[in-house]
Amino acid sequence: MDSKEYVVGIDIGGTTTSVGFVDRQGSLLAEMVLDTWGAQPAALLVNRVCDAITRLETSLSRGCRLRAIGIGAPNANYHRGTVENPVNLNWGPSTNLVQLFQEHFTVPLAITNDANAAALGELLFGGARGMKDVIVITLGTGLGSGIIVNGGLVYGADGFAGELGHTVVDPAGRFCACGNRGCLETYVSATGLCRTVSELLAERCEPSPLRDICFSQLTSRQVSEAASRGDGIALAAFDKTARILGMKLADAVAHTRPEAIFLAGGLAAAGELLREPATRYMNEFLFGPYKGKVKLLLSAVTEGNGAVRGAAALAWQELAVTTRS
């Protein structure tokens, strides 16, 4: 195996876009972060990213060979190569991003959403290595998920399968940005945790340092820190969040029976404050034959460059598919 082979992973966000060169072991060889400038056309971002790839390539040792490019982006459709109606990107209803990159590169190219990329990153470079049936939950502003069955991502008929964040917890519950009510991500996410804290502060009279923080300034990290110090409101918020998460993970297990479920993203940094009670509640709600058999684990992919490595994992997988065919 040529140790000088590498792929490029590209993570496109509403604010910044990261570009990284990653080898087969998942090591990041070089990286650059660009402003996305989402109000501009997609083609301009593609041109800037391609320039970044060319500049970074010169920093690698002579003889390195680019094999494939993987892209993680919001509302990305693997089947079509498109980004469709992305939030915070003024790109219109559908932009064929793969086609735009193919004007610059002839290597295999693929695109998927960030949660799917995270799942592949866990499978190739993280705690899911050697597993074939896995679910990865990304917990940030919202809740994303990537579902892997028999070693492959589940895309569904139209390329958008696996949106566990938009399964319903309560039909009369919290309003969601998707237009529905009671979606899982309105309860289990960094934003959802803060909303739960706000509700508990209104319902309960006990003192809490969280009362001194304006809701618009409250972060999940502050809630985690308060919970670590034993604050009752923060601990209750984590318990409620974990119960809802455990309940919906039990539902997901009934569909695909994964070997393990991994928690990734900013809220997962709370560690055992979330994982331990969520595991307990998941097992409480699980169908009998599954109880105690599904591991709930924290992601083993480094958070700082996890998105780029996830996109790179997609590139390595796409290369393997292209080589087999």
Image (cartoon, rainbow, N blue to C red):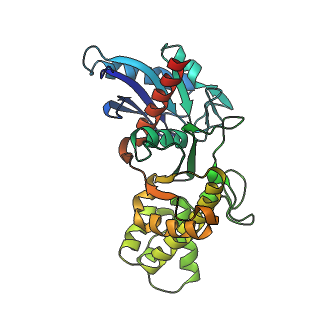
Q: Is residue 241 visible?
A: no
Residue in the image at 39% along x and 18% along y? 66
Residue 265: x %, y % from top left: 45, 51
Viewer-proximal residue, 172 or 261?
Answer: 261
Residue 212 position, x and y percent, is: 43, 75
Which residue lies at the image location 68% right of the left edge and 50% below the top edge? 178
Nearest to the observer: residue 186 or residue 130 = 130
The answer to whether residue 251 is seen in the rendering is yes
Left or right, 172 with reference to 222: right
Q: Nearer the viewer, residue 314 or 151?
A: 151
Picture quarter with the C terminus: top right
Residue at (41, 73) in percent of width and height: 227
Would you place residue 148 above or below residue 324 in this image?
A: below
Farthest-out residue, bottom:
205
Q: Quadrant of the N terminus?
A: top left
Q: Nearer the viewer, residue 83 or 145?
A: 145
